[in-house]
């Protein structure tokens, strides 16, 4: 496996081999393994560093409905569109119903950030913007099968959310259960979404080349998530904040 693909000489001859390869990618490449997350969940960051993480992650969260609308636009199959559109509602919410974006703003507000500033995305890192926009472009430009496959990081999200909830509540006195509601809600949403996507790629990736493309799409998505944490570490742990980006108070 390389930084971009499962590598040469690997042939996936069945749906079962495809699933095994996908789970191996998650076990070795999911961003739960990143050093920044270990600092975050272990209580090793200060409040300003946690603010920087939440601020930058907002751009990713708020772009998910745009990405999902892009995925829906790729399908003439009505059943797939119906299945996929609840993801937009999960994040955007509906009239009188709180969605994931609102819950994320509850987190950033609880951490002491101004919501207008967060929503403006003026303070995010350049790498955050580039990575998130690359994800949207991927879902627009690649095959519909690859677009769905790129969402399969959700297979591995619940364990990360559980670790985040327990770790942050234990270690930070400025965190409480109410502002962590985004993650508690995703404990049920993510498995449902991941189950559909996994069944879809197993049923529709019918050739070794298509199964390879599915795996490479998941590798791409793990890179999208990983590079955002690389940028956060470089800026807010190593101390190389780029011009114009958010600067925590006291830093």
Image (cartoon, rainbow, N blue to C red):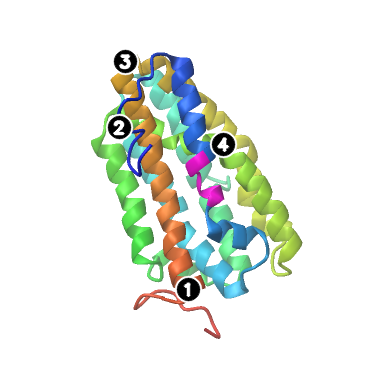
Taking the image as shown, residue 62 lies to the left or right of residue 69, namely right
Q: Where is residue 123 in the image (x, y as percent from the top left)?
A: 41, 71
Mark toward the viewer: 4 or 2 = 4
Residue 122: quadrant of the picture = bottom left
Give above or below for 110 relative to 17.
below
Tell me the quarter of the picture where residue 157 sits.
top right
Disc on res. 207: 3
Looking at the image, is mark 1 or mark 4 earlier in the sequence? 4
Which of pointers 1 and 4 indicates the residue nearer the eye?
A: 1
Q: Are marks 4 and 3 in contact (CB under 8 Å)?
A: no
Observer able to see residue 93: no
**Viewer-closest of 226 and 170:** 226
| Nearest-to-viewer mark from 1 and 2 | 1
Can you tell which mark lies on residue 238?
Answer: 1
The secondary structure type at the circle numbered 2 is helix
Q: Are marks 1 and 3 in contact (CB under 8 Å)?
A: no
- According to the picture, the residue beneath numbered tag 2 turns out to be 73
Estimate the spatial distance between the alpha carbons at disc 1 and disc 2, rounded to whole Å: 41 Å
Residue located farthest toward the front when viewing the structure as drawn: 9
The reply to whether dot 1 and dot 2 touch (C-beta < 8 Å) is: no
Q: Quick check: 118 left or right of 66?
A: right
Per the rendered image, the range of residues in magenta is 28-33
Q: Which of marks 1 and 2 is nearer the N terminus?
A: 2
Q: Residue at x 69, y 64 (%)?
A: 175
**Residue 143 in view in this figure:** yes
What is the number of callouts on the image? 4
Q: In this view, does 177 lie to the left or right of 107?
A: right
* Residue 175, above or below 144: below
From the image, tell me which residue sits under label 4. 190
Q: Quarter holding the N terminus?
A: top left
Residue 48 falls inside the magenta stretch? no
């Amino acid at each position: 496996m390389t930084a971009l693909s499962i590598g040469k000489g690997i042939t996936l001859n069945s749906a079962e081999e495809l699933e095994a390869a996908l789970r191996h990618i998650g076990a070795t490449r999911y961003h739960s393994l990143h050093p920044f997350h270990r600092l975050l969940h272990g209580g090793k960051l200060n409040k300003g560093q946690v603010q920087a993480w939440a601020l930058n992650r907002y751009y990713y969260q708020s772009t998910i409905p745009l990405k999902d609308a892009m995925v829906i636009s790729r399908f003439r199959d009505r059943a797939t569109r119906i299945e996929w559109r609840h993801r937009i509602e999960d994040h955007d919410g509906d009239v009188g119903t709180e969605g994931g974006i609102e819950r994320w703003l509850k987190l950033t507000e609880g951490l002491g950030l101004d919501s207008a500033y967060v929503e403006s995305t003026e303070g995010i890192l350049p790498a955050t913007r580039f990575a998130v926009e690359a994800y949207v472009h991927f879902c627009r430009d690649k095959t519909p099968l690859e677009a769905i496959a790129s969402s399969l990081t959700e297979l591995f999200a619940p364990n990360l959310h559980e670790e985040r909830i327990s770790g942050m509540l234990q270690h930070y006195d400025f965190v409480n259960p109410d502002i962590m509601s985004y993650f508690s809600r995703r404990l049920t949403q993510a498995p449902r979404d991941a189950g559909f996507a996994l069944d879809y790629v197993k049923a529709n990736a019918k050739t070794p080349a298509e199964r390879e493309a599915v795996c490479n799409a998941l590798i791409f998505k793990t890179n999208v998530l990983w590079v955002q944490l690389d940028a956060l570490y470089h800026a807010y742990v190593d101390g190389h904040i780029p011009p114009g980006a958010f600067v925590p108070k006291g830093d």
